[in-house]
């Protein structure tokens, strides 16, 4: 792992070459707003555009997304310039008009001094239920869970995550990873004692043989057993009782 | 000729000699244009009529050699076009009934039929020679030289004209020397970006890897653009030869031609060409005994505009959704299947054999210092001569629109010209003397783009035009990044409001803010350039936006909510044509007396204005 030096907000920092700006900034206590990036999901990032920063390199400046911009020797990053703030504010206003009910977006907007968007808020047919269409749910399902139960449907303004043909997915294991990683909490997941409802399907929950708590859908256990070859007995008890 | 594998360079030369020998024809070969526009105008029937006539007359030489369908000959609105091998004659608007006369006079005796030529609208004089037809006379055909002069489905035609000799020359050079040549030629990507081709090849070659790819981008998606289609349809071997040379130079054994599925003839001709080249051993293993292997596969695009963007295109070839990725690591490093990839546009590839054959100095003789060579444009819109043209870089827009294009029809006034498709911008009359090259156009707020040129006259509303392009882009945005997905539809809302009379103070500024957000914040080049149609129309036609917003008036008389139709009593003769044609039956009046329009029923369709012989219908 080659280590290189680069400058972020005037401070010289040492980091491993090709790591992304956002991760290194975080470790150095520099906050850059972001939504669609999750370090555990390699294919994530680059779509919400909130983490735009100025990258100065080889006499050239451009705005890049910190979540996937690789660190190289001689790079200078500025996270707080007037250009960065102006463009980010524009993007947040667009998101606020799209999902006016999202607390996460409202807070980000408030931080940049926006209470109300200047555009007509999406509602009725256009209601997006807090979803900013960043695609992280699809990416985690495909890359981390490995089942690809959801995809981004349609394109352009109609782009939205969903199951194929918006019908309950046969391959979904009800793990809820999509709902956990969603940056705006936009995926409804309803947990009752014995069942979990998500993406239009109801999953039977497995109850811990010791404490009796529901802790995982049966379908998810089936999937893990199938893909890892682990003994099913292992899943009788919940992690707390093992 | 029989297609057996040619395994040496001498073999190819001998093969060429054999074609030339066997195809000696006493009578000049007739070329019937088989480009898409001419086909639509009935050139297939003309071709069949020639075949029948030749057969009936028992003309010497086989029918196959005597009559050929070619690719686009350029002057599309005058089609079907007919030309003759080695003769300076071009016939226009040819119909099957003209065929016996053409055969008798021109084919057999070499006589010219003037009335089948081009008639100058001003002088009313007929011309059949290329040089005397302004549309052709001002062009410089290099890339398109053979398009229209050979049968694209016959590899022998291409070889007979010297085809694949650039490849032979390239095989005698080192890969680095080829790249040096391409770099020194100054060739820049013809797909729009204008990136130096040689530099791209060099960066790709420099990466250590087991596999490299070369790709031909034939996903021409701009409305009104048909340059790449015409080359793929009309001279596919030039592209293939360019790709083999490029692959040899960078060290790639596998190429892809990505062609949009809406181009069936281009796909068919490329497919035939690839199979024929493979049959002769020009593709495949150990090409011409060079020890170099290379083959090309056609990948058909599904019709998404965004797939013309290189990273989206590569994802699409790989079987994924066509969405761009951040190109912080360039595709020459990590492209198709994460392997180093050279992607060039159709026209760029077709330039490669020209550079190798003619040499760097020869190539640089045409064009400007920063943009050498020629550029193919498709000329469309409110211009007299529409079609496919190739001009040296550096000619002015005025020459393109007025000398080649013949100016604006019906004596209307020129207003603007849109270059570069939806990502381009509008250039007003004051900048008509601008040189056409990559840098001048982007300085003016537009871009070269792939080469679509749409001319607009005084009856084009610039706000409506911006709305048209943004509507297109909203439909074609992939939706991956926020500024493009959300920003464009907000822009469309505002533009729609302005054209429907709901524009308000601050709309222009808000549009500019959104453009700024897209320009800096969008993920791919389609997003960052999507603001251009709005920004350039605001920049050059701000008064028109203001007229819509402040006075609720559309100066060009286009935006239906802001105009009314009225009949000028002085000019109206009461001929009743308008009243008969009005679909709403809302025009009334006595015969031979001025008529009136009932504004409450009028749907502003414009039929009355179009049919009035006296220009008595006024739009306000």
Image (tube, coloured by chain):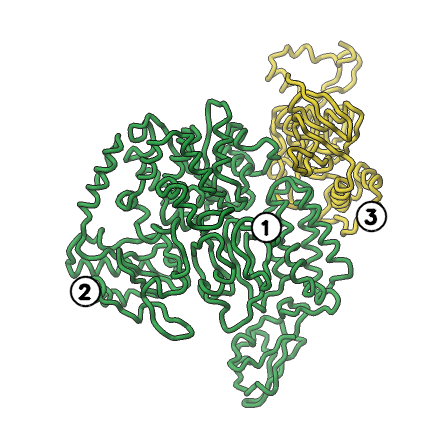
Chain colours: A yellow, B green
Q: Is residue B471 visible?
A: no
Instruction: State the CA–CA distance, disc 1 to disc 3.
Output: 36 Å
Q: Name the quarter where the C terminus of chain B is drawn.
A: bottom right
Left or right: where does residue B256 sit relative to residue B575? left
Q: Residues within 10 Å of mark 1 (few under 14, many from 20)?
A: some
Marks 1/3 same chain: no
- Which residue is depicted at the point 67% across and 32% down? A45
* Mark 3: secondary structure: loop
Q: Secondary structure at mark 2?
A: helix
User: Disc 2 and disc 3: Cα gap in Å?
Assistant: 80 Å
Residue at the spot 54% in from the left edge and 44% down from the top edge: B193
Eye-nearest disc, 2 or 3 = 2
Residue A82 in sight:
yes
Chain letter belonging to callout 3 = A
| Element carrying mark 1 | helix
Number of labels in the image equals 3
* B372 displayed left or right of A133: left
- Circles 1 and 2 on the same subunit: yes
Q: What is the quadrant of residue B237 in the picture?
A: top left
Q: What residue would you read off at disc 2?
A: B109
Q: N-terminal of the two: label 1 or label 2? A: 2
Near-viewer residue (B19 or B296): B19
Q: Which residue is mark 1?
A: B442
Image position, residue B215 (x, y; %): 46, 36
Q: Where's residue B589, x and y in %?
A: 59, 86
Q: Position of residue B506 (x, y in %)?
A: 77, 58
Circles 2 and 3, Cβ within 8 Å, touching? The answer is no
Q: Nearer the viewer, residue A42 or B365?
A: B365
The residue labelled by disc 3 is A116
Give the letter of the chain under mark 2. B
Which one is nearer the viewer's eye here, B43 or A101?
Answer: B43
């Amino acid at each position: 792992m080659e280590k290189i030096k680069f400058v972020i907000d005037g401070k010289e920092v040492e980091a491993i070459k090709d790591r992304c700006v956002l991760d290194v900034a975080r470790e150095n206590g520099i906050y850059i707003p972001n939504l669609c990036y999750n370090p555990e999901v390699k294919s994530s990032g680059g779509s919400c555009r909130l983490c735009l920063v100025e990258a100065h390199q080889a006499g050239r400046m451009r705005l890049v997304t910190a979540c996937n911009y690789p660190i190289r020797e001689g790079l200078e990053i500025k996270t707080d310039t007037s250009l960065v703030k102006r463009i980010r504010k524009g993007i947040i206003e667009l998101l606020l008009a799209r999902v006016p009910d999202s607390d996460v977006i409202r807070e980000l907007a408030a931080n940049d001094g926006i209470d109300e968007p200047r555009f007509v808020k999406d509602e009725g047919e256009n209601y997006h239920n807090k979803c900013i269409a960043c695609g992280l749910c699809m990416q985690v399902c495909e890359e981390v869970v490995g089942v690809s139960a959801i995809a981004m449907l349609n394109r352009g303004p109609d782009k939205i995550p969903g199951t194929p043909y918006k019908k309950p997915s046969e391959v979904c294991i009800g793990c809820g990873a999509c709902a956990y990683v969603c940056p705006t909490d936009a995926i409804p997941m309803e947990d009752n004692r014995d069942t979990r409802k998500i993406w239009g399907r109801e999953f039977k929950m497995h109850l811990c043989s010791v404490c009796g708590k529901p802790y995982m859908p049966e379908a998810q256990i089936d999937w893990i057993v199938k893909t890892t070859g682990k003994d099913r007995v292992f899943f009788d008890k919940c992690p707390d009782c093992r | 000729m029989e297609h057996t594998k040619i395994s040496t360079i001498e073999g190819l030369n001998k093969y060429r000699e054999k074609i030339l020998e066997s195809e000696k024809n006493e009578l000049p070969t007739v070329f019937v244009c088989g480009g898409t526009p001419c086909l639509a105008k009935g050139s297939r029937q003309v071709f069949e009529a020639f075949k029948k006539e030749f057969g009936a007359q028992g003309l010497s030489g086989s029918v196959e050699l005597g009559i050929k369908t070619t690719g686009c000959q350029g002057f599309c609105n005058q089609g079907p076009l007919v030309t003759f091998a080695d003769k300076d004659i071009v016939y226009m608007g040819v119909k099957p009934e003209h065929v016996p006369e053409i055969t008798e006079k021109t084919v057999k005796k070499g006589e010219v039929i003037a009335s089948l030529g081009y008639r100058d609208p001003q002088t009313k004089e007929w011309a059949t020679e290329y040089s005397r037809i302004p549309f052709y006379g001002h062009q410089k055909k290099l890339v398109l030289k053979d398009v229209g002069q050979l049968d694209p489905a016959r590899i022998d035609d291409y070889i007979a004209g010297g085809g694949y000799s650039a490849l032979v020359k390239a095989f005698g050079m080192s890969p680095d020397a080829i790249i040096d040549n391409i770099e020194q030629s100054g060739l820049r990507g013809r797909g729009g970006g204008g990136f130096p081709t040689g530099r791209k090849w060099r960066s790709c070659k420099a990466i250590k890897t087991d596999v490299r790819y070369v790709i031909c981008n034939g996903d021409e998606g701009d409305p009104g653009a048909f340059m790449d289609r015409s080359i793929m349809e009309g001279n596919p071997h030039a592209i293939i030869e360019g790709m083999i040379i490029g692959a040899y130079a960078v060290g790639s054994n596998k190429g892809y031609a990505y062609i949009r599925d809406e181009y069936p003839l281009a796909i068919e001709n490329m497919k035939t060409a690839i199979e024929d080249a493979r049959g002769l051993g020009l593709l495949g293993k150990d090409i011409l005994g060079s020890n170099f292997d290379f083959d090309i596969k056609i990948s058909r695009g599904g019709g998404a505009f965004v797939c013309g963007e290189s990273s989206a295109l590569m994802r699409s070839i790989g079987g994924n959704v066509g969405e761009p990725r951040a190109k912080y690591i360039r595709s020459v490093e990590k492209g198709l299947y994460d392997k180093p990839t050279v992607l060039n546009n159709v026209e760029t590839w077709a330039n490669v054999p020209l550079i190798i054959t003619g040499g760097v100095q020869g190539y640089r003789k045409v064009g400007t210092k920063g943009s050498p060579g020629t550029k193919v444009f498709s000329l469309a819109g409110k211009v007299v001569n529409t079609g496919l043209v190739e001009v040296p870089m550096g000619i002015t827009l005025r020459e393109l629109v007025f000398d080649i294009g013949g100016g604006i029809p019906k004596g209307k006034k020129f207003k603007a010209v849109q270059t570069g498709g939806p990502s381009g911008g509008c250039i007003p009359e004051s900048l008509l003397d601008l040189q056409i090259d990559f840098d001048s156009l982007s300085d003016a707020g537009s871009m070269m783009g792939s080469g679509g040129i749409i001319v607009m006259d005084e009856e084009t509303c610039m706000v409506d035009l911006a709305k048209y392009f943004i509507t297109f882009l909203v439909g074609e945005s992939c939706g991956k990044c926020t500024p493009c997905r959300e920003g464009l539809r907000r822009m469309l809302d505002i533009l729609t409001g302005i054209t429907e009379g709901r524009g308000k103070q601050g709309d222009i500024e808000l549009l500019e803010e959104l453009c700024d957000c897209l320009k800096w914040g969008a993920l791919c080049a389609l997003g960052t350039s999507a603001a251009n149609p709005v920004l350039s129309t605001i920049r050059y036609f701000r008064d028109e936006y203001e007229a819509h917003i402040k006075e609720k008036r559309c100066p060009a008389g286009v935006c239906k909510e802001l105009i009314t139709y009225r009949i000028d009593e002085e000019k109206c003769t009461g001929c009743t044509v308008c009243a008969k044609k009005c679909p709403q039956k809302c025009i009334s009046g006595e015969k031979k007396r001025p008529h009136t329009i009932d504004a409450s029923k009028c749907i502003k369709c414009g039929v009355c204005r179009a049919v009035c012989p006296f220009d008595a219908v006024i739009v306000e």
